[in-house]
Amino acid sequence: MNRWFFIYLWSLLFFSTDYLYAQHPINLVPAPLLIEEGDGFFQVTEETVISVENEAQEGIASDFADLFTVPAGFTPMVEIGGQNAAISLVTDKALKKEAYRLKVSEDNIRIYASDTKGFFYAFQTLRLLLPSDIEGQTLANQIWKLPVFTMTDGPRFGYRSLMLDVARCFIPKEEVLRILDCMALLKLNTLHLHLSDDTGWRLEIKKYPRLTEVGAWRVDRGRLPFYARRNQAEGEKTTLGGFYTQDDMEEIVAYAADRQINVIPEIDVPAHSCAALAAYPELACPVVKEMITVLPGLGGRNPEMIYCAGNEKVFTFLQDVIDELLQLFPSPYINMGGDEATKTYWKICPLCQKRMQEEHLKEVEDLQGYFMGRLNDYIRSKGRTMMGWDELTNSKLPDKAVILGWQGLGNAALKAADQGLNFVMTPARVLYLIRYQGPQWFEPLTYFGNNTLRDVYNYEPVQADWKPEYEKLLLGVQASMWTEFCYNADDVMYMLFPRLAALAEVAWSQKEKKNWTDFQQGLDNYLAHLNKKDVPYASSMYNIQHTVVPEKGKLCVKLDCERTDVEIRYTLDGRVPDMYSSVYTMPLKLDAGTVVKCASFVKDMRKGEILTLPLLNNKATGKHVLSKAPMAYLLTNGVRGSLRQSDFEWCTWDNLNSASFTVDLQQTESVQQVLLGCLTNYGMAVHKPKRVIVEVSKDNRTFVQVGQKEFSETEIFRDGNYVEDVEFTFKARKVRYVRVTAEGFGSCPESHYMRPGQPARYYFDELQIR
Ligand code: ACM
Ligand code: ZN
């Protein structure tokens, strides 16, 4: 008995990996509802026939069969009404919209669905379970095997969307088609195209040719970040841009339809409209006297130039544009934007003011309600539904409109839900893919904070404190890809993938089915398919995020990797970490001056970038900072912030006018120099403070001032992105406490070419004491 038990244990050990593999050959994103795995394989061969019931199914089955043509060197035959075919499609009206059942045995495959979409998604599941060579464009030496299983699957949400901003960065038609194909594999069913903005108009409108002749082109500012691009000067040529002809758009819409994806056009009004107004300036309020141009970047105050709400020609124009949209897009939804409209000119425009009087509107916000309401009426009269951003909740909500919730975790849309309107969640804080997807030191420059793969994955739209009716009105979720920081389609794909796979799981899978460990494996399979398609994607999930916290003069170094199936290996002697380096298991308590190098590994393969942390060593390093700012510990954690104020190494204060912090050196020390790292990032309104004062004390009660610096407006608002150590050197003193007090400038002056009147923030790191 004992001996047999031992042999049993040994065999478990010996075969454990194969055993596990046999139990989990099905790694899918998005995670399906129910799988029952079996033994053995079904093989697709030259002889495989797919039988379908009708022409709609035939189209979908043929698209699947065509996948084999190049990589397999054969194309399975598709026949309508065939008997005894190896793969057959069977309508089952008991199944819900978009749902399917799949039965794969060694001899045959049966696919059940109640609609074409269901059959299509079943084929996407099979496609993902085939060797990734199925996506390749060369003949592959493969056996086209599928595991035996039974699956019941269907979506959690009916609206599973990606928004592509093709206005900030024009994405050529061919690349949009590639993205559509990658979306289809993820069972996403909506592509929202943000077709117009201050930065470009991207769709040919036959009645208004200048929209693309003028509006599709802007000055080229090279690789300058979006927030640093100066507006077009008089006489400058506009050479950067592009647009879709109506033929292009028909092709995109048809390609999407073949993949069960609906394309929703967005023409953003009344703001984000400088491209249209550059083409037709008569549509702006007549009080706008400056030249209106297509903006290359933020534009300073220029985005305040918006469509005039008092001019009837504006409505004629927009209705004409909508008429052409209705012809091109079969979509039930037409999106008219409505976000971020600053009403500077509406307040002083005689036409807008007249309109407000006639319509008995008290506030300019109500004028926007009127503006959007008219467009909504028009769109509804044509049998379609208007969509718009959650600013539509700021005044009278357009009847039956669908609201995209983006502000305040998307909860701004709940105001619409309270009035019975449908809504979609695309909270900026989680689902805006413009944000950093991994540790910022390794990422291409972009805006704001992080929305990592896991952040997107963990997103749950339905909140515990929601009224029950909200859930019924929630149509689904959307990832929004704003492209301010993309220069080409590859940049866009890098930002989309792999996070779009996480969004797909949020949109498709029941929340109880979500499991990070399984997701990682399903994701690897999906990414193997992207590899064969030559679609670029980010490996940021393998990079290390550090957190370094001062602890009684030492530094506590925490290392995190989003992938939970890796080992983090590190060195403290300056060597490049490799498969033999120490494995990180818990936070490291290190001395100032140590250099940490680390990276993630899977077996002997390094997966992520090497993170190098050269920990500083001065009298402040590792010492406690007394401050109201929760991030003040960053000032003495030995790690210097990069040029990005959002990299979790910079300390800032909510109070724009003043800030103060005190470093406790824990013992009396001789001090003669204090250096305060100050960041400038002009386009982001990050600037030096107006004044910095340094004081010292033995007892944290009586302080003596040892230095003061004051900066002029010209010094503070110097253009660029740089770190400056503000230096205070004085006669050596024996002290224990060093207090730094800063006074901010307040708001950026009107002469600020990017952010006039906006808060000027100051950011400090690191504080060095010698
Ligand atoms: C938006 O982010 N302005 C919709
Ligand atoms: Zn006006």
Image (spheres, rainbow, N blue to C red):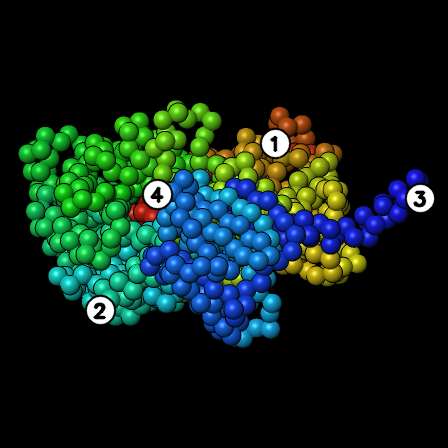
The reply to whether residue 120 is in sight is yes
What numbered label is drawn on residue 235?
A: 2
Where is mark 4, residue-wise? 758
Proximity of marks 3 and 2: CB atoms separated by less than 8 Å: no
Callout 4: SS: loop
Kindly tell me whether mark 2's CB lies below 8 Å from ligand 2.
no
The N terminus sits in image quarter: top right
The amino acid pointed to by label 1 is Leu
Left or right? Give the position of 9 relative to 520: right
What numbered label is drawn on residue 626?
A: 1
Dot 1 or dot 4, earlier in sequence? 1
The residue at the point 42 percent across, 51 percent down is: 90
Q: CA distance from mark 1 to mark 2?
A: 54 Å
Q: Residue 156's x, y, as percent?
A: 44, 39
Mark 3 or 1, closer to the camera: 3
The residue at the point 25 percent across, 47 percent down is: 332
